[in-house]
Amino acid sequence: MNKSKMRLTWQREQINNLLLTFALICCCCCLINVVSAQEAQQPWYENLPAVAMDYKVHIDAGKEDCYHQYVQAGATFYVSFSVVRGGDGMAGFAVRNPANEVVKPYQWQATADYTDQVSPGGYYSVCIDNQFSRFAGKLVNIYITVVKYDAWDKYAKEIEQLQLNMQNFTTTIGTVERNINDMMGYQAHSRHREARDYALLLDNNTYIQTFSLSQIVVILITCSIQVFFVRKLFDVKSNSKSRI
């Protein structure tokens, strides 16, 4: 009897240990799924100190398209747009901040930009309006940068913990980062102008070729008509009848 009781007790302990292990594994899996879901909701570039994106989008005639960009709190947000081709070469451009406030109202123009030095954090809306153009679509170039200048300060604090004086280094790096950001903005404007000039060059080439071919066709038709009527002038019909 004692041996059978000891065996039952040992079996119960083994079962309890297995159940406890299984419960711990289930809890770990749930935590991993929750963390993975939270990471999936965060943008992939959230922890990067700087992000630059360049897009070319086509806006149909009479339409409006909006694009959303996530910006961390305290970061600098910059966006610029330029109409590459289509219609009169202009479109409406507006920006809304994370509070859904219009920080840059709509204006019908060829190029525009907007900068928020210290962002409150959240999603910005960049809208391109082509509703005034009823027949012509527009090809628009959009350039967006998100820069966190305080990332260098955090890096400096970590270095200072190692008893190193990095103030001059971080100041220089911050200046270089700002200069690089400004330079990238200028390069984006240069690319916008280059794309617009290239599109204008292609349109002019197409127009000249079409106009030249049409002129050649008109000249050939005109020459053919002139030759036909000139020959008609010298076409003499004989009305004399033979006499026997």
Image (cartoon, grey):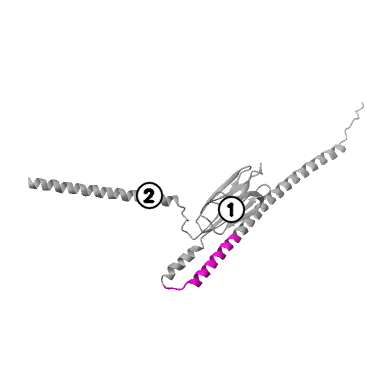
Q: Nearer the viewer, residue 187 or 214?
A: 187
Q: CA distance from mark 2 to mark 1?
A: 35 Å
* Residue farthest right in this picture: 243
Quadrant position of the N terminus in the picture: top left
- Dot 2 or dot 1, earlier in sequence: 2
Q: Position of residue 149 (x, y in %)?
A: 51, 63
Mark 2: few, some, or many residues within 10 Å (few <14, many ≥20)? Answer: few
By secondary structure, the bulk of the magenta-drawn segment is best described as: helix
Q: Nearer the viewer, residue 205 or 198?
A: 198
93 within the magenta span:
no
Q: Secondary structure at mark 2?
A: helix
Q: Position of residue 12 (x, y in %)?
A: 17, 46
Identify the residue under disc 2. 34
Q: Residue 128: in sight, yes or no?
A: yes
Q: Nearer the viewer, residue 122 or 112?
A: 122
Quarter occupied by residue 227: top right
Q: Nearer the viewer, residue 140 or 239?
A: 140
Q: Residue at x 48, y 66 (%)?
A: 153
Write down the region rendered in magenta: 163-186
Determine whether, in the image, residue 81 is placed left or right of residue 24: right
Q: Residue at x 43, y 50 (%)?
A: 40
Q: Amino acid at mark 2?
A: Val
Identify the residue under disc 1. 142
Determine whether, in the image, residue 13 is placed left or right of residue 177: left
Q: Secondary structure at mark 1?
A: strand
Q: Amino acid at mark 1?
A: Ile
